Image: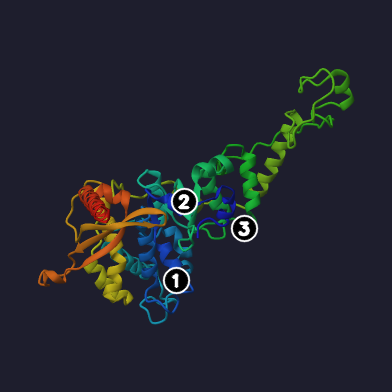
Amino acid sequence: MGVNDLWSVLEPVRESVPLYSLSGKTLAVDLSLWVCEAQHVQAMMGRVTKPHLRNLFFRVSSLTLMGVKLVFVMEGEAPKLKSETMSKRTEKRHRGFKKGSAFKCGKSTSRGRFNAVLRECAEMLDYLGVAWVTAAGEAEAMCAHLDSMGLVDGCITNDGDAFLYGARTIYRNFNMNSKDPQVDRYQASRVQADLRLSRENLVGLGILLGCDYIPKGVPGVGKEQALKLIEKLKGESLLERFHQWGMATTDVPDVVKKVPHCNICQHPGSAKAHERSGCSLCGSRCFCQPQDFGYQCPCEWHHYEQARQASSLEANIRSFISLSEKHWRIIREFLISKEKPVSHFRSKHPNLLSMQKFAYDKMEWPMHYTSEKVLALMTYAELMSRKCGRDVESQIRPIRIFKLRVRNAVACFEVIWKHFVFPEERAAEDRQEVRTLEEESLFRLAFPEIVEGYVKSKALAEESKSKEESSFISQIL
């Protein structure tokens, strides 16, 4: 999906960064791509009920507990331009659904059925208290819109079209299972500075190399040719040149006769002449200085030769393409946003009862297993709310700190909580007390009074122990 060969083009600016570096960021996620990825995990195929839900749950849980705020984006109405590729993409997306499910592959498969899977994911996100929005069209377009408006700090997507829609930062290929999890980061600023690929150039590449709207691109034009043309344009974008192609022919420079050049400084004139009289371009009175590798002489003939080569390359590419109204509609699809303004994302607390029922019905998870997995999200949400000064009704409350612990070289408290997740008719003694490990610094900010009580009790215990030891020593002496 996306522009053909785009990730290989962007490989020079790919940065592998620690997954934990995303902590504190808000990221937009193309939900449909996560669903697709889950259908092709070999370890889950035929063994896990609803792998897309299981994969979504554990990714959300892991990233949330790393301090990453996620905003999921659901697909909206597909652009009419995409009708040619819809059936092939949908077939590929549904290839992993097991036989007998409500979403079978075949001729009857449609975007509507896939959207039903996305709605199922959205229902679980609601129970987990995670924000999501629906795009006007393509999900990657909405992700890019949120990023370009500064409402999120980047996009998690494998679809390079997000850059064409205006995204500033894309994260992809993250591995959450290793001891040192990493994620690939691509930044539009580096794509522009290092590769000279502006957003307009990327859209032009989408036309030439192919994208979701024209999968085959322009037959006869390859990646190397397209990149060479961008280099020859020297700052002018592909879209600007496309406009010129539609209006008039490209100017061809007048022929300039080649003159002899010095084999030392690469400037007009012979080496012997420069040795006798110097070189005006070098500024020398005698003898020339060798030039660096790749140096280009600024003489009239070299200017002509560069223009001739660029004109020849452009003429070759131009001979393969006849820009139509469809091409301009595709360009407008990428450059003109259809998304509605979004001011903020409302987060909620996880709802354990609802999540237990949902997980039992959809994924066949036992109630106690769901409670164990959701509990960490509940306590984290409670701590973050208190840290931010929000006092909201909660299903869980810390009672006291049991002791100090260390997890992954980070100081933590082992905290005893009481959670109220059962119906009111249940007896009070049935309301459970549970223990979790919470990061010390975060818990201090959220519940300073409980930490203060713990510190005082520890001090009293130490004082009492010291007195007992002193008394024991006195008795011995």
Which mark sits nearer the N-terminus, 2 or 1?
Answer: 1
261 relative position to 426: left or right: right
- Quarter assignment of residue 258: top right
Q: Nearer the viewer, mark 2 or mark 3?
A: 2
Q: Nearer the viewer, residue 361 or 145?
A: 361
Mark 2, Cα crowd under 10 Å, few <14 / some 14-19 / many 20+, is many
Lower sequence index among marks 1 and 3: 1
Q: Residue 219 has which mark? A: 3
Residue placed farthest to the left in the image?
Answer: 425
Callout 1: few (<14), some (14-19), or many (20+) C-alpha neighbours within 10 Å?
many
* Residue found at x 75% / y 31%: 297
Give the image quarter of residue 219: bottom right
Q: Which mark is residue 304?
A: none
CA distance for labels 2 and 1: 23 Å
Q: Looking at numbered disc 3 in the image, what kind of residue is underneath it?
A: Pro
The residue pinned by badge 2 equals 170
Is disc 1 in contact with disc 3, using a CB cutoff of under 8 Å? no
- Picture residue at 24% right of the left edge, 65% below the top: 434
Point out residue 351 in the picture as x, y percentages from the top left corner: 23, 64
Mark 2 and mark 3: Cα distance apart in space:
29 Å
Say which residue label 1 marks.
Answer: 39
Kindly indicate whether the residue at mark 1 contacts the one at mark 2 (C-beta within 8 angstroms).
no
- Answer with left or right where residue 369 lies relative to residue 40: left
Q: Amino acid at mark 1?
A: Gln
